[in-house]
């Protein structure tokens, strides 16, 4: 729930400030929900007697899932969250199923960064993109200096709580109307979990087409962020010559900020976050999750 996530954010924030070498009030879960709840990004389709409800989490293969759902259902449409939720609760429980997909938090952040970078250059759809275009102006695209400026704003405001880099658990908050998920799949095993969703309904579905409606803006920005973080091929080399400890501190900041995602969706921490106190914090959050994340004085 939102109070638990807010408490967790406050508890880990000193770690975020220490790793990131900055000081700023935390940007809290639940702020600026309009972006992720008002946009028509939820999808509904009918398959036989069953209505399938897809909750879209940004940068977790949403458009790919939309396209596949449209292929296997009739009366497919996209709705805002409020209309989506009302429709869900007006549908007979025996004739409905809700599902979503999540993604490894670090991989999703890198993809979210690339999405924001692309939008700042081609014309923004949201005010946060206009803001970031001005913020990044003057720094070469793909440079570590430009990414450092991006991180400064990410630390300060979460890019104004932008949905592309917002923790995934926030997409599943009720916002006055709650939808229980019948399946929370993972993009890393998309085909398997897509089939599982139909198996739960005792039906056989069409195989998931991972090439359908792929949403990509190229690899330049993703490669630049991986280099900055010291991930991927950057584990072996860095075109800016930054030291590994300096690069890896940003990975650790992301681990702290996305701690709830790692725990709730059962993702393994990257190597850079395997040391203490991160491991103890993960264990504590898992234990405390049954007690509303009461960990303020212990992380």
Image (tube, helix red, strand yellow):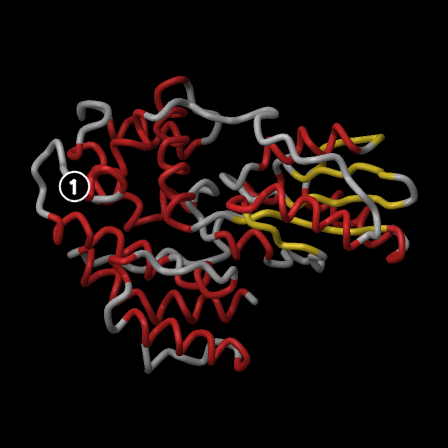
Residue 1 is at least partly visible in this image: yes
Identified at 9% across, 42% down, the residue is: 242
Q: Which residue is mark 1?
A: 236
For label 1, the SS is: loop
User: Residue 75 vs residue 257: left or right?
Assistant: right
Point 23% across, 23% down: residue: 141
> Which residue is painted at 63% across and 56% down in the image?
175
Question: 188 above or below 278?
Answer: above
Residue at 54% of width from left, 49% of height from top? 102
* Left or right of 208 on screen, residue 280: left
Tell me, yes or no, if residue 177 can be seen here: no
Pick the quarter of the image with the N terminus.
bottom right
Question: In x, y percent, where is residue 214?
Answer: 54, 26
The quadrant holding residue 80 is: top right
Relative to 4, residue 178 above or below:
above
Residue 206 coordinates in the image, percent (x, y): 75, 35
Near-viewer residue (147 or 274): 274
- Location of the C terminus by quadrant is bottom left
Residue 125 percent across, percent down from the top left: 48, 26
Percent x, y for residue 34? 56, 43
């Amino acid at each position: 729930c939102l109070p638990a996530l807010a408490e967790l954010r406050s508890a880990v924030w000193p770690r975020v400030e220490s790793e990131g070498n900055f000081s700023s009030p935390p940007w809290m879960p639940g702020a600026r929900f309009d972006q992720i709840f008002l946009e028509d990004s939820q999808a509904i389709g009918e398959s036989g007697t069953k209505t399938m409800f897809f909750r879209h989490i940004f940068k977790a293969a949403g458009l790919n899932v939309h396209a596949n759902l449209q292929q296997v259902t009739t009366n497919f449409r996209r709705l805002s969250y409020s209309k989506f939720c009302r429709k869900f609760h007006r549908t007979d429980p025996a004739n409905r199923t809700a599902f979503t997909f999540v993604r490894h938090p670090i991989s999703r952040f890198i993809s979210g960064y690339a999405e924001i970078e692309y939008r700042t250059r081609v014309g923004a759809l949201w005010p946060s993109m206009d803001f970031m275009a001005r913020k990044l102006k003057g720094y070469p695209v793909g440079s570590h200096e430009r990414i450092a400026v991006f991180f400064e704003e990410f630390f300060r405001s979460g890019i104004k709580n932008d949905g592309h880099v917002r923790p995934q658990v926030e997409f599943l908050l009720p916002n006055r109307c709650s939808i229980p998920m019948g399946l929370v799949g993972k993009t890393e095993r998309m085909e398997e979990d897509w089939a599982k969703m139909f198996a739960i309904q005792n039906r056989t579905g069409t195989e998931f087409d991972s090439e359908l409606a792929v949403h990509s803006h190229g690899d330049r920005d993703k490669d630049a962020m991986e280099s900055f973080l010291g991930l991927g091929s950057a584990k072996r080399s860095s075109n800016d010559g930054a030291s590994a400890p300096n690069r890896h501190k940003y990975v650790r900041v992301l681990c702290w900020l996305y701690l709830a995602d790692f725990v709730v969706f059962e993702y393994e921490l990257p190597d850079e976050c395997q040391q203490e106190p991160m491991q103890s914090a993960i264990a504590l959050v898992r234990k405390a999750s049954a007690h509303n994340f009461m960990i303020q004085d212990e992380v």
